[in-house]
Image (cartoon, helix red, strand yellow):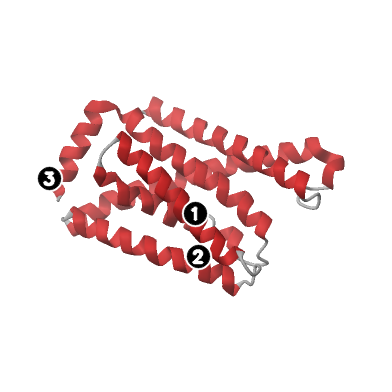
């Protein structure tokens, strides 16, 4: 990963976050006028604030993404066997599905959101993981599931605390998920075939 490629990934992720936040925020503002500041009377101001929020969410997403890459590197060094690390990631992902539902239920969001959101996030993570496998190899499935569900769950934790608001959770979690998916799908493209092959050989030797 060169500095130029990282710079591209950094700014493009922030741009993706801004666009997704504006689109999601606009839809939520049209359906719930209390969602934005000052309601529909300050649409331009709301769009600007949503865009700025998206830029910050994009940067936050990239921090989580590279934190996972660091964790993955350290874990492979500790476990030595790749299947052990993958097994732990798989177990943690399943545990996080129930954990997210429990957190939402404990906050009493409503009668359905506490189980609908985990299932939707899990299904969306499966779709991204399937696409990643199609473009790379089968070994990418579990790490992608862990990244898309667990890391997104952790990054969205601030929205899950305090006075839980369904609109706030959705507004933060959707851009985080999209940004994480974008970075994950862009990584093997930015690395290129030679770097990807060398990374696969290193991972295989580590296992």
Q: Estimate how packed mark 2 is, as few (under 14), some (14 to 19) or many (20 or more) residues with alpha carbons within 10 Å.
A: many
Nearest the camera: 193 or 70?
193
Nearest the camera: 69 or 126?
126
Give residue 151's position: percent from left, percent from top: 44, 54
Give residue 102's position: percent from left, percent from top: 52, 71
Residue carrying label 1: 121
Earlier along the polypeptide chain: callout 3 or callout 1? 1
Task: Residue 193: name its quadrant.
Answer: top left
Earlier along the polypeptide chain: callout 2 or callout 3? 2
Give residue 196's position: percent from left, percent from top: 25, 33
Earlier along the polypeptide chain: callout 1 or callout 2? 2
At 39% from the left and 36% from the top, the residue drawn is 185
Quote the CA–CA distance across marks 3 and 1: 33 Å
Residue carrying label 3: 205
- From the viewer's perspective, tell me whether residue 76 is left or right of residue 44: left
- From the viewer's perspective, tell me whether residue 60 is left or right of residue 78: right
At 26% from the left and 53% from the top, the residue drawn is 74
- Of tags 3 and 1, the one toward the viewer is 1
Give the structural element (helix, strand or loop) at label 3.
Answer: helix
Contact, CB < 8 Å: mark 1 with mark 2?
Answer: yes
- From the viewer's perspective, tell me whether residue 48 is left or right of residue 89: right
Quote the CA–CA distance across marks 2 and 3: 35 Å
Count every numbered label the image shows and give the total: 3
The residue furthest bottom is 106
Give the structural element (helix, strand or loop) at label 1.
Answer: helix
Q: Is residue 16 above or below residue 121?
A: above
Residue 1 in sight in this render: no
Q: Estimate how packed mark 1 is, as few (under 14), some (14 to 19) or many (20 or more) residues with alpha carbons within 10 Å.
A: many
Q: Is residue 112 above or below residue 66?
A: below
Residue carrying label 2: 100
């Amino acid at each position: 990963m060169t500095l130029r490629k990282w710079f591209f990934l950094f700014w493009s992720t922030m741009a993706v976050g801004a666009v997704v936040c504006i689109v999601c925020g606009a839809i939520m503002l049209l359906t719930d006028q209390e969602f934005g500041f000052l309601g529909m009377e300050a649409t331009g101001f709301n769009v600007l604030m949503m865009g700025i929020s998206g830029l910050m969410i994009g940067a936050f997403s990239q921090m989580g993404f590279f934190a996972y890459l660091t964790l993955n590197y350290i874990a492979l060094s500790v476990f030595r066997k790749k299947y052990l690390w993958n097994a732990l990631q798989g177990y943690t992902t399943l545990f996080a599905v129930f954990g997210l539902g429990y957190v939402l239920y404990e906050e009493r969001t409503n009668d359905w959101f506490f189980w609908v959101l985990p299932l939707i996030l899990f299904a969306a993570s499966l779709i991204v993981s399937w696409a990643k496998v199609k473009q790379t190899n089968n070994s990418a499935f579990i790490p992608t599931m862990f990244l898309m569900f667990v890391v997104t769950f952790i990054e969205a934790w601030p929205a899950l605390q305090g006075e839980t608001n369904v609109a706030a959770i959705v507004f933060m979690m959707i851009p985080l998920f999209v940004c994480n998916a974008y970075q994950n799908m862009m990584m093997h493209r930015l690395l290129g075939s030679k770097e990807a092959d060398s990374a696969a050989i290193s991972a295989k030797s580590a296992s």
